[in-house]
Amino acid sequence: MITVLLGFATSLVYGFADFFGALSSRKLKPLFVTLFSGLGGLFFLLLMSPVFGLPANPDAIFWGVLAGLGSAVAITALYASLAIGPISILSPLGAVMSALIPMFFGVIFKGEQFTTVGWFALLGILVAVGLVGFVPSDDIRLPSAKGLLLGLTAGTFIGLILIFINQAPTTSGLTSVVVMRGVSATTIGLFVLVSFLINKNVSRSEFSLGYKVWLMVAFTGILDSSANVFFLFAMRFGSLTVVSVLTALYPLGTLILARVILKEKIAKVQLAGVLLALTCSALLASGI
């Protein structure tokens, strides 16, 4: 039960972070949103470290570094794929892939097993991921080979990040996610610096924004880091397969806030995905 609840909370908070990140990206370049929200999230994790612990565990540091490098690749590929589009196909594709990679790892290398009903519940959640993330459009087009490759790359590396974090010792506190945040922010920061030195197409006016935008960027980082913590503890209570599949439901959080704050309509196919996700999550929570 606790694993499902934490896994579901992880997906919702990740989705909330994506929502505010998307709003921030309307005012500030997405790469800058990623960089500064990452730094804000890192600061938040450091504030939380006295509560959860931050031991200098070599294994946790190692897996945190790998997760950080994977995060930089995943974010870059994700933004690039969504820029090419169509988002209605590439977004749920990446989400499903991010669940399949750790699922196969959990089953093959960790020996995780489920009842027949449990497998159907997991499969149902994967279907729900696609339905919730799908944005109906009258002009639906097939993705290009480049867009497809980038979407699959983003989903694959997100899945690898979940595996890397899962490999950290259970006694390592927040070390792995703090290192991940630090490495990711450093990598993206260096990329931004090199891009600026080469192109010099960034003006000070891009940063002359109101405090509300910067608060939104900071809030994005706090939510994203909070989701990292939820995921970390969810895996310490239960199965990597279950948690990773539930985490892939992150479009649900974005969908909820878009409906509540922006008053966007929820398509029937998305509503069906929400109901399917809740039903299958309840089956998993029943202990099957």
Image (cartoon, rainbow, N blue to C red):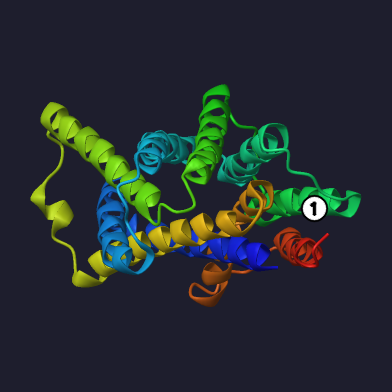
Question: With 123 as the anchor, is 24 left or right in this view?
Answer: left
Q: Which residue is mark 1?
A: 124
Question: Does 32 sit above or below residue 190?
Answer: below
Q: Is residue 146 above or below residue 67?
A: above
Of 15 and 91, nearer the camera is 15
Vertical side of 142 occupied by 266: above or below: below
Evaluate whether residue 4 shows in this view. yes
Q: Quadrant of residue 159?
A: top right
Can residue 266 be seen here? The reply is: no
- Residue under the image location 71 percent in, 32 percent down: 108
Q: Residue at x 74, y 61 (%)?
A: 277
Residue 242 percent across, percent down from the top left: 69, 52
Q: How many marks?
A: 1
* Residue 262 x/y as whole percent: 49, 72
Q: Amino acid at mark 1?
A: Gly
x and y percentages locating residue 70 in the rendered image: 42, 35
Front residue (pair 149, 105): 105
The residue located at (71%, 64%) in the rendering is: 274
- The residue under the point 41% across, 41% down is 75
Circle 1 Cα neighbour tier, 10 Å, few/some/many (<14 / 14–19 / ≥20): some
Which of the image's four quarters has the N terminus?
Answer: bottom right
Of helix, strand and loop, which one carries label 1? helix
97 over 118 or under it: above or below: above
Left or right: residue 261 versus residue 203 is: right
Q: Position of residue 264 (x, y in %)?
A: 57, 69
Q: Quadrant of the C terminus?
A: bottom right
